[in-house]
Amino acid sequence: MKVIVNGAGGHMGKAVIEALEKKGYELFAAVDKYDEKAEYHSLAELPAGADVLIDFSHHSAAFEIAEFVKRTGVAAVVATTGHTEEEMDAIKASAVSAPVFHSANMSLGVALLVELAKKTAAIFPDADIEIVEVHHNRKLDAPSGTAKMILEGILQVLPHKRGVFGRSGMAKREKEEIGVHALRMGNVVGVHEVHVCTENQCITLKHEAVSRALFADGALSAAEYLVGQPAGFYSMNDLLKGKI
């Protein structure tokens, strides 16, 4: 498998390169707009011949990625978070030309957390539900894409609920709220907790990433799955069919 890594100079880009080398895959091209040492600085510079693009750059690269996919037909795994609605629409539109995979979190464990949160919420529909996420102090988007993914999963089974992002001042909790809270500190890779509390008991579901290699391995699993698939938009649910 010949892999393009977009955002190759960042922490996750470097982790992906290390992971694919361990698996014996070929680094077809290392692309980074802001890294002077990068092999390429734009997807438009790349020669033909790659099998898949893995993007861990910045959400603003969405339009360039969409154009690249439409122009080349190369499969793409978009692992960046924080996309605007217009950026996400562009990525989805490119999936008519090639298989495109997107997930706010590339961890199999997080996917399991979402499913467990959905099941717990369905069993306790009247409970108070709060989502708390913790990341390093350099993360740009808040709340995390993963926290939003957990919220969206719960809203699938409890559509009468609504997300509330943070609280301050006189903010008495309403029953239909699902609170979502973001903490930024130190070098935390990623922690996500879901608290489901009734009058008499509390259930806490937690996932903690201890290494960025976790997300790199997940992105490579998505790339392996994507190569050979027909054009279309794919998610973690497609990757996990039959496992959960």
Image: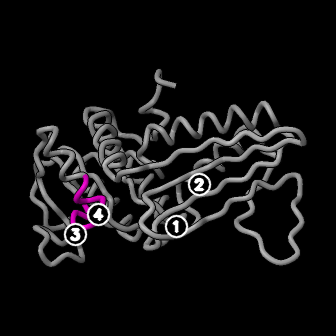
Residue 8 inside the magenta-drawn segment? yes
Of residues 43 and 15, the one nearer the viewer is 15
Of residues 26 and 129, the one nearer the viewer is 129
Is 240 displayed left or right of 28 in the figure?
right
Is 88 displayed left or right of 205 in the figure?
left
Of residues 109 and 233, the one nearer the viewer is 109
Query: Which amino acid type is shown beneath numbered disc 1?
Result: Thr
- Circle nearer the viewer, 3 or 4: 4
Mark 2, Cα crowd under 10 Å, few <14 / some 14-19 / many 20+, is many
- Circle nearer the viewer, 3 or 2: 2
Query: Which amino acid type is shown beneath numbered disc 3?
Result: Asp
Mark 1, Cα crowd under 10 Å, few <14 / some 14-19 / many 20+, is few
Question: Between marks 3 and 1, how big is the CA–CA gap?
Answer: 21 Å
Question: Between marks 3 and 2, how big is the CA–CA gap?
Answer: 27 Å
Q: Which residues are magenta?
A: 6-15
Residue under label 3: 32
Question: Between marks 2 and 4, how big is the CA–CA gap?
Answer: 21 Å
Residue under label 4: 11
Residue found 61% across the figure and 47% down from its top:
150
- Circle nearer the viewer, 3 or 1: 3
Residue under label 2: 147
Mark 3, Cα crowd under 10 Å, few <14 / some 14-19 / many 20+, is many
Question: Which of the two discs, 3 and 4, labels the residue nearer the N terminus?
Answer: 4
Q: Using the image, tell me which numbered label, if any, was put on residue 29.
A: none
Give the quadrant of residue 118: top right
Query: Which amino acid type is shown beneath numbered disc 4?
Result: His
Residue found 78% across the figure and 30% down from its top:
123
Question: Between marks 1 and 4, how big is the CA–CA gap?
Answer: 23 Å
Cβ–Cβ below 8 Å for labels 3 and 2?
no
Against 108, residue 211 (above or below) is below
